[in-house]
Amino acid sequence: MNINRVTLVGFTGKNTRNSSTQNGRHITRLSVATTKRYKDPAGTWQEKTQWHRCVAYGPAADSTAKIQTGTHVFKGELVHREYERTVETENGPVKIQWPLTEIVIDAISVLDRKAKQGREGVA
């Protein structure tokens, strides 16, 4: 059995960006921050935040497009792909294949923001 599933619980960083493919399929893009809390060797709480690129297509894009900054659960598939990008060099512009990793959203749920409160000291 093979499974490629991702579940993120975090905060959206910006408003969603909506577009369509040439054949009219809706696309919604957004970024989600997840923060890991841990104690350093001195016993002080630290936080490390990572940003994740997320994209939704079709019906999932329509519901995702309505989301503003807040807390969300994303369930999706981790996708690695490349696209052609032009990079400036000393010898002029050069086209290269640029790697990209995204979470493709197939379902999304909004969480209650109150759940974030009172988490001090929770690992």
Image (cartoon, helix red, strand yellow):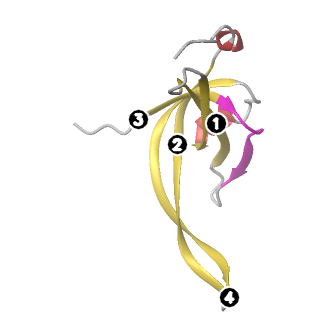
Please, what is the three-letter code of the amino acid marked with disc 3?
Answer: Arg
Residue drawn at point x = 60 percent, y = 22 percent: 45
User: To which residue does mark 3 refer?
Assistant: 5
Q: CA distance from mark 1 to mark 4?
A: 35 Å
The amino acid beneath tag 1 is Val
Q: Quadrant of residue 9?
A: top right
Please identify, in this view, whether the residue under mark 2 or under mark 1 is nearer the observer. 1
Identify the image quadrant of residue 21: bottom right
Of marks 1 and 3, the one in the foreground:
1
Which mark is first along the chain, 3 or 2? 3
Asked if the residues shown at circle 2 and circle 1 are in contact, with their CB atoms under 8 angstroms apart, the answer is no
Residue 34 placement, left or right of 67? left
How dense is the environment of label 4, judged by Cα within 10 Å: few (below 14), some, or many (20 and up)? few
Q: Amino acid at mark 4?
A: Glu
Secondary structure at badge 3 equals loop
Q: Which residues are magenta?
A: 11-20
The residue wearing badge 2 is 104
Rendered residue at 37%/39% (across/down): 4
Q: Position of residue 35 (x, y in %)?
A: 60, 30
- In the displayed orientation, state which residue is furthest to the bottom: 91
What secondary structure prevails in the magenta region? strand
**Disc 4 secondary structure class:** loop
Which is more N-terminal, label 4 or label 1? 1
Asked if the stretch drawn in magenta spans residue 19, the answer is yes
Which residue matches tag 4? 90
Q: Are marks 1 and 4 in contact (CB under 8 Å)?
A: no
Residue that extends furthest to the front in the rendered view of this protein: 42
